[in-house]
Amino acid sequence: MKKIGTDKAMNTYNRLSKNIEKVIKGKSQMIKMILAAFFCGGHVLLEDVPGTGKTTLAKALAKSIGTDFKRIQFTPDLLPADIIGVSIFNHQQGSFTFHRGPVFTNILLADEINRANPRTQSALLEAMGEKQVSVEGRRLDLSSLFFVIATENPIESHGTYPLPESQMDRFMVKLSPGYLNRDDEVEVISDQLFDHPLDMTKGVASEEDVFAVMDAVLSVRISEELRYFIVDIIGATRKNEYVGVGASVRASLALMKMSQALALFTGREFVVPEDIRMAAVPVIGHRLQVLPQAKFSGITPQAVIQQILEDIEILE
């Protein structure tokens, strides 16, 4: 693939961001984080109450690229085969034929992922971690563009199964869209007086453009000092008095990649400390297990990370 410059990569990002913002109002920072994870080859978990635009956002991203999109509605009776696929016996040929499931796509929306049982949730582990699935002893590769946007409702607990730590660790970032402010909500209902903006969303970037930006992200320089800064942040979560289980090495890699993408979106070819600080909470927060006594005292993962960022000094 021919490498592109920072300006062209930033141009692709800006086209995608502005196109999605025509549908999703007032969430430019969240869109930036999702696109950063997307261009890093990661996955996103959106946790919020229903009606905050989680599903619409996933569809808007897919339509903006003009790529394959599939949705899985997770329910308690969903089986792993419903995600990966199933082999069906062909009587005429006298053999089994594998019918691919919805995981064989580019952008996958895993809606209300915490409603499925742990066995079904785990069907996505290999797919998200290695972009492949194992079926009857065979390895089947997924699209190199494979990207999961999963949603969950944090309020309703009846009939849900909390995501295990191993699965939470597969998500590069966790975000909470939140409600719109007054003006943005008025704009949303005004835009939908006659039709939905999503119906008019057109593609503004090709898959080739996306791969070019992914390649450009890898080319963003990050100094050894900043790599140590990242490792010190992650290491501090493992020693924190309020945390039972700290962040993994996967968190260090995710924080580095996200900071590279955010630097690129700003038009820089190098990472600065602010890029790392901006990505820290979305990347690390969902990977920490705060001790029960700390939770009762009102200590949150976000507060722990913010304190760590304040405590660690770096020459800028």
Image: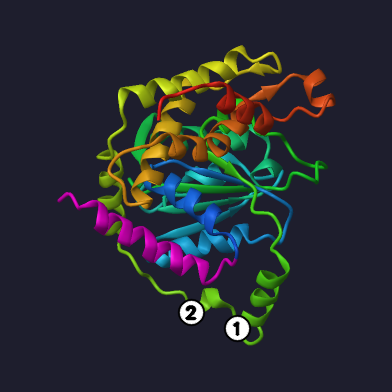
* Circle on res. 200: 2
Most common secondary structure along the magenta stretch:
helix
- Going by the picture, which residue comes out furthest to the front? 315
Among the 4 quarters of the image, the one containing residue 303: top right
Q: Is residue 175 visible?
A: yes
Q: Which residues are magenta?
A: 1-25
**Who's the residue at 42% across and 51% down the image?**
91
**Between residues 251 and 97, which one lies in front from this camera angle?**
251
Q: Check disc 2 and report its element: helix, strand or loop.
A: helix
- Mark 2 in CB contact with mark 1 (< 8 angstroms): yes
In the rendered image, is residue 98 in sight?
no
Q: Which residue is mark 1?
A: 195
Of the residues shown, which amino acid type is indicated by label 2?
Met
| Front residue of 76 and 88 | 76
For the residues labelled 2 and 1, the Cα–Cα distance comes to 9 Å
Report the residue that reaches farthest toward the bottom: 194
Q: Is residue 116 left or right of residue 297?
A: left
Name the spot of residue 120 as percent of width and height, x first: 61, 37
Residue 175 rendering spot, x and y as whole percentages: 60, 45
Q: Is residue 5 magenta?
A: yes
Left or right: 156 as drawn, with respect to 249: right
Mark 1 residue type: Asp
Say whether residue 300 is left or right of residue 228. Answer: right
Number of residues whose C-alpha sits closer than 10 Å to that of mark 2, classed few (under 14), some (14–19) or many (20 or more): few
Q: Which residue is found at the position 58% from the left and 59% from the top?
A: 27
User: Could you tell me which secondary element the residue under label 1 belongs to?
Assistant: loop
Q: Position of residue 82 (x, y in %)?
A: 56, 47
The crowding category of the residue bearing disc 1, from other C-alpha atoms within 10 Å (few below 14, some 14 to 19, many at least 20), is: few
Marked residue nearer the N-terminal end (2 or 1): 1
Count of numbered badges drawn on the protein: 2
Front in this rendered view, residue 87 or 27: 27
Position of residue 164 relative to residue 145, above or below, is above
